[in-house]
């Protein structure tokens, strides 16, 4: 196993750590055992959460790689870390919604759990001074966050990734309610980056609508480690 040393750490984030590698074209991302609800309302340290999330992340990225989605994922390095391509990240997250929940349900008074007629894509601008607001396409281009042609590629990747992942989870008896995607560039190529896990997605049981994601912690619905482990057990079958 590769040892990720603290002296090589570039970023120590809330739920992940970023490490430099000997190869300057690569980075390592390590998942921590910390869990935070949106905006840090609640925090918890859950033993082995990082290992569980790393395994889920590996399965999902490997699935997308095998189905023609360009991503930064290369391979697992340790139980709780993976090797990835270094990119120049866009300062946005793309929220993809398939089923009404959370802020969307509150904002538009749509009942939680209602299937949307088509997926909704929302651009989240990463700017803490502004509160990380949602912005539209023309605002994103006007602010110089990316070019219009880049945005078209991002939407193309997001739509295909959403369809693949949604169907993948359905086959396992799970619903991909919503999730957030991040993108970066390697040269001129736009690829999917960061993580794919229940830390950045809402995932429900198809039959019971039981929540198995970070909302378990946020809403005091039970054991988060048990919920994440259930997702892992079902998608690795």
Image (cartoon, rainbow, N blue to C red):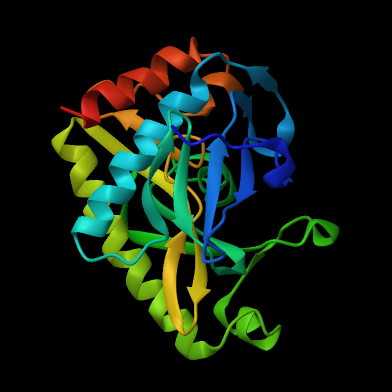
- Identify the image quadrant of residue 212: top left
Q: Is residue 63 above or below residue 101?
A: below
Q: Residue at x 31, y 44 (%)?
A: 60
* Front one among 149 and 114: 149
* Quarter that holds the C terminus: top left
Q: Residue 182, image x and y in percent?
A: 51, 60
Q: Residue 168, image x and y in percent?
A: 20, 44
Q: Which residue lies furthest to the front in this view?
A: 22
* Front one among 222 and 229: 229
* Count of marks, rendered view: 0
* Res. 33 visible in picture: yes
* Res. 112 visible in picture: no
Q: Residue 207, image x and y in percent?
A: 21, 24
* Front one among 236 and 98: 236
Q: Residue at x 52, y 69 (%)?
A: 184
Q: In this view, does 180 lie to the left or right of 42?
A: left
Q: Residue at x 45, y 49 (%)?
A: 83
* Quarter that holds the N terminus: top left
Q: Residue 153, image x and y in percent?
A: 39, 79
Q: In this view, does 10 lie above or below 207?
A: below
Q: In this view, does 62 lie above or below 42?
A: below
Q: Residue at x 27, y 49 (%)?
A: 62
Q: In this view, does 36 lie to the left or right of 100?
A: right
Q: Residue furthest top?
A: 222
């Amino acid at each position: 196993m590769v040892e990720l040393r603290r002296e090589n750490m570039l970023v120590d984030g809330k739920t992940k750590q970023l490490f430099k590698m000997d190869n300057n074209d690569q980075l390592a991302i390590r998942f921590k055992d910390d869990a935070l609800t949106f905006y840090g309302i609640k925090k918890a340290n859950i033993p082995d959460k990082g290992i569980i999330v790393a395994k889920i992340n590996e399965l999902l990225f490997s699935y997308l790689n095998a189905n023609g989605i360009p991503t930064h994922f290369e391979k697992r390095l340790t139980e709780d870390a993976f090797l990835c391509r270094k990119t120049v990240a866009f300062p946005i997250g793309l929220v993809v919604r398939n089923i009404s929940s959370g802020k969307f349900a509150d904002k538009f008074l749509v009942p939680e759990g209602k299937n949307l007629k088509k997926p909704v894509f929302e651009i989240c601008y990463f700017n803490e001074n502004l509160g990380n607001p949602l912005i539209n396409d023309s605002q994103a281009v006007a602010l110089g966050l990316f070019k219009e042609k880049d945005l078209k590629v991002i939407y193309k990747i997001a739509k295909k990734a959403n369809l693949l992942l949604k169907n993948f989870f359905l086959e396992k008896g799970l619903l991909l309610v919503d999730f957030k995607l991040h993108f970066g560039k390697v040269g001129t190529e736009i690829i999917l980056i960061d993580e794919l896990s229940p830390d950045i997605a809402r995932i429900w049981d198809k039959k019971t609508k039981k929540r198995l994601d970070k909302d378990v912690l946020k809403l005091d619905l039970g054991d988060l480690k048990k919920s994440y482990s259930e997702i892992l057990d079902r998608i690795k079958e």
